[in-house]
Amino acid sequence: MKLTLDITVCSIIITIGMVAIYGTIHKWAMLVDPPEKMSIFYSHALLKKIFGKNFLIFYNYFLGFAFISFGCYGLWLVLN
């Protein structure tokens, strides 16, 4: 049961990373250009307000690749 749960969690982490990258490539508004009025409770809007839209796009790619990397590393640890 623990092995199945570990694999599921790692797969979800990898999927989140892929969605972040896919959404950034396709310019999903909530990922690359969120409204600044949401900066009180949405971290992407706050980052856009502080650093700008170009930084937010870089941040999304970085975060996506980080999630994929950590998910793959977790799978590697579980399966070895």
Image (spheres, rainbow, N blue to C red):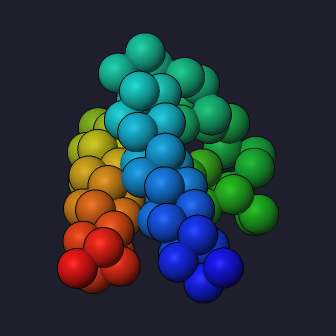
Front-lying residue, 48 or 19 = 19
Asked whether residue 55 is in view, the answer is no
| Residue at 49% over, 66% down | 7
Report the residue that reaches farthest toward the top: 26
Q: Is residue 12 above or below residue 4?
A: above
Q: Is residue 28 above or below residue 38?
A: above
Report the residue that reaches farthest toward the front: 1
Front-lying residue, 30 or 63 = 63
Q: Is residue 54 above or below residue 29?
A: below
Marker count (numbered): 0
Tell me which corner region of the image, top left, top right, bottom left or bottom right, holds residue 30. Answer: top right
Q: Position of residue 17 (x, y in %)?
A: 41, 48
Q: Is residue 47 above or below residue 7?
A: above
Asked whether residue 23 is in view, the answer is yes
Does 30 sit left or right of 32 as displayed?
A: right
| Residue at 51% over, 49% down | 16
| Residue at 45% over, 19% down | 27
Does 50 sit left or right of 78 as displayed?
A: right
Q: Quadrant of the C terminus?
A: bottom left
Q: Quadrant of the N terminus?
A: bottom right
Q: Position of residue 65 (x, y in %)?
A: 26, 52
Q: Position of residue 58 (x, y in %)?
A: 25, 45
